Image: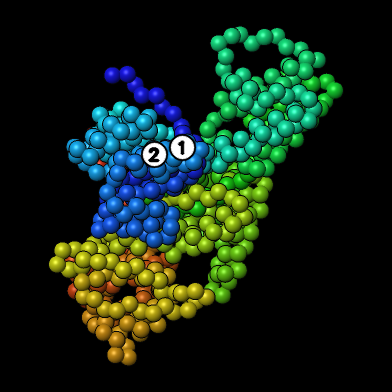
Amino acid sequence: MAPSLLTAVDSQDHVHLIIGSNPLAGARCNRSLEVGATPKVIAPADANLHYGLAKSVEEGKVEWIKRAFQDSDLTTFGRDEVENVVDAVFITSSGKSALSTHISSLCRRLRIPVNVADAPNLCTFTLLSTHTNGPVQIGVTTSGKGCKMASRIRREIASTLPADLGPAVERLGTLRRRIWEEDHALGLTSDLEEDDETSGQSSSFNRLITSSDIEAARNRRMRWLAQVCEYWPLKRLASITDADVSTIMASYISETRSSHPTSESAILSIAELDSRSRRGRIILAGSGPGHPDLLTNLTLKAIKSASLILADKLVPAGVLDLIPRRTPVRIARKFPGNADAAQQEFLEWGLAAAREGQTVLRLKQGDPYLYGRGAEEYEFFTRHGFKVTVLPGITSALSAPMFAKIPVTHRGVSDQVLVCTGTGRKGASPDPPAYLPNQTCVFLMALHRLGDLIDSLVKDGKDWPKTTPCAVVERASCPDQRVIRTTLGYVCTAVEEEGSRPPGLLVVGRACEVLEKPLQRWVVEEGFDGFDVTEMGDLVGMSELDTPLATPME
């Protein structure tokens, strides 16, 4: 079987006849609307329209012809300019029905494109599995051998493309038009469509051209633009901005108006463009609970490559030691009453560095989106026009209990986990959670006001029993990790007696006694055993684990 001829059809104002009322009919109508066509549905008046299709009919986007199909419909509902013949027909009911076969035969006779669901033999065209990003459209077909496979191939292809490729192509189209208009003003240009045919690769060798040749100037321009499209990395093309387009145009105009024009190499290159318009970038990354080996590989790479690192004061020394000596580091000057001011100061530092073209790493403890104000910083920097990359971190809310031998969920004990903060906005105390015996609660940023938190749980008629097991976990995964195991009735006394070792958190619930149960009012456990990764590698045959996961960098 010969392959199909793939085409792109301008369907603006075309009339598409959709026969059926099922969900597929709704999908066909939506697609027709997306490409600028006018969909008309033919289905009996008592048909049960799919919700989305019924909504489109109600909003006036789709016309519903409430009766069965008639042969004359094919030559009645079309546009005047094509003598009322419809432009395409979609049959969404079973392809095995006699009606589908009959309509397909009529359409073939009238040369109307027809598509019948699940019946390739009745179709004169098929719809591709498409990926659309602005002006960029990518279609995949398996020639009727399996639409599921086509969808998978399309997803695989789309996943390799830069997310901003569509807008970049739009900008390059604008650049192409502006260059053509500039040449037209100088009398150097032919038709824009002719340039499309001559600017690509040719089967013939390049001819020798001279700077004094007007035609050579036009060819040089189009060859340069073609090379931009052909050889620039897609990621760089996808990151092109309106400012880049203006910079390129300024360079091009300067070259074309010069009394001594040179070759296309004189026009702005990618390296020159990067040097002139390089924009900084922001990375929000979580550093995990404390141990440097718990950093993700991406965060470690970000630490190595950043131009400036803005770190929370609670990021442990073991993580800070990984920062190259050449990289400047600023630590947040946060203290009670100054948190908001310090946060704003950090934002201004990051913004100033990004505007200088630097890569700014905002290093946070734990995960940036779990009580890390990460979303606020994301909004701030994107509002100022910068791309923000967010890298996850292992949150202490789940890892600290594990290091303290507390399974936050356990069959028959706890089937849910609630993560709370002990400090609300501007230092306010948040509302305490309700008591559920089958729930484990993890309170972050709560130890500095532990007394108020416990009072809100157990006093004034609250339903939290004072005998509820709890544990204070401090500096989880660090060499000086400490765990205080006790109950809500004694936790304040225990912390007052033992002192504070921030950062720490409070775990509350019966899960605290699944693996370890204190035999006294409270029990203190000091130290962290670390990770014997080398031995683990020997056991499972993973020789690559013989080296530490993270080592200090010079």
Residue that appears at 57% across and 54% down:
382
Drawn side of residue 474 relative to residue 211, left or right = left
Sequence-wise, the earlier of marks 1 and 2 is 2
Drawn side of residue 218 relative to residue 44, left or right = right
Can residue 356 be seen here? The reply is yes
On screen, residue 338 above or below 11? below
Tag 1 near tag 2, CB within 8 Å: yes
- x and y, in percent, of residue 35 in the image: 46, 43
Type of the residue with mark 1:
Glu
Type of the residue with mark 2:
Thr
Quadrant location, the N terminus: top left
Q: Which mark is residue 83?
A: 1
- x and y, in percent, of residue 471 in the image: 29, 70
Residue that appears at 42% across and 38% down:
85
Residue that appears at 30% across and 44% down:
70
On screen, residue 4 above or below 83? above
Quadrant assignment, res 191: top right
- x and y, in percent, of residue 50 in the image: 29, 55
Residue that appears at 78% across and 14% down:
213
Can residue 512 be seen here? The reply is no
Disc 1 residue crowd, few under 14, some 14–19, many 20+, Cα 10 Å: few
Drawn side of residue 174 relative to residue 115, left or right = right
Of residues 34 and 157, the one drawn nearer to the viewer in this rendering? 34
On screen, residue 75 above or below 438? above
In the rendered image, which residue does mark 2 sit on?
75
Disc 2 residue crowd, few under 14, some 14–19, many 20+, Cα 10 Å: some
Quadrant assignment, res 334: bottom right
Of residues 154 and 439, the one drawn nearer to the viewer in this rendering? 154
